[in-house]
Amino acid sequence: QVQLVESGGGLVQAGGSLRLSCTPSRSIFSINNMGWHRQLPGGQREWVSDIQSGGTTAYADSVKGRFTISRDSSRNTVDLQMNDLKPEDTAVYYCVADLPGGIRSWGHGTQVTVSS
């Protein structure tokens, strides 16, 4: 298991930017895959982006070109830079970590609200 702590959520106007960070309780390089999911106001949970241990990244079509996932080895974080935010990006964002052995851990989530 790994504990995950998210930070960086908040309220922003449409077109604005936010940067989310996820800090795991172990080295990011000991984790197979880390990423972000979000739960929309209606309750639907969807995958947003992830980054593999080798550095390969992937994005949902809805955020491609606007969001960037990265790792910061000096801070031991996985960050999600979100630009050109839209009201439909409003959600609780969860950090997710996939460990060896198929174990998945979730953070507690951070709220992102985009006003129109």
Image (cartoon, grey):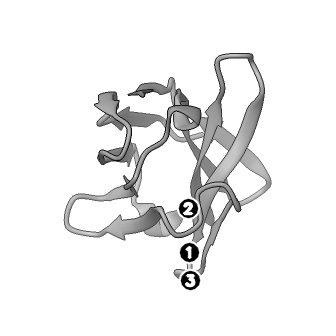
Q: Secondary structure at mark 2?
A: loop
Numbered mark located on residue 54 in the image: 3
Q: Earlier in the sequence, mark 2 or mark 3?
A: 2
- Between residue 14 and residue 55, name the one nearer to us: 14
Instruction: For marks 3 and 1, give the CA distance.
Output: 4 Å
**Residue 113 sits above or below residue 56 on the image:** above
Q: Earlier in the sequence, mark 1 or mark 2?
A: 2
- Between residue 16 and residue 38, name the one nearer to us: 16
Q: Position of residue 108 (x, y in %)?
A: 51, 23
Residue closest to the far front: 116
State yes or no: discs 3 and 1 in contact (Cβ < 8 Å): yes
Mark 3 burial class by Cα count in 10 Å: few <14, some 14-19, many 20+: few
- Between residue 65 and residue 31, name the one nearer to us: 65
Residue of label 2? 31
Q: Secondary structure at mark 3?
A: loop
Of the two numbered discs 2 and 3 in the rendering, the one whose residue sits closer to the viewer: 3
Residue closest to the far left: 74
**Residue 64 sits above or below residue 96 on the image:** below
Instruction: For marks 1 and 2, give the CA distance.
Output: 7 Å
State yes or no: discs 1 and 2 in contact (Cβ < 8 Å): yes
> In percent of the image, x 37 and y 67: which residue is there?
71
Residue of label 1? 53
Q: Secondary structure at mark 1?
A: loop
Mark 1 burial class by Cα count in 10 Å: few <14, some 14-19, many 20+: some
Look at the image and tell me in which quarter the C terminus lies. top left
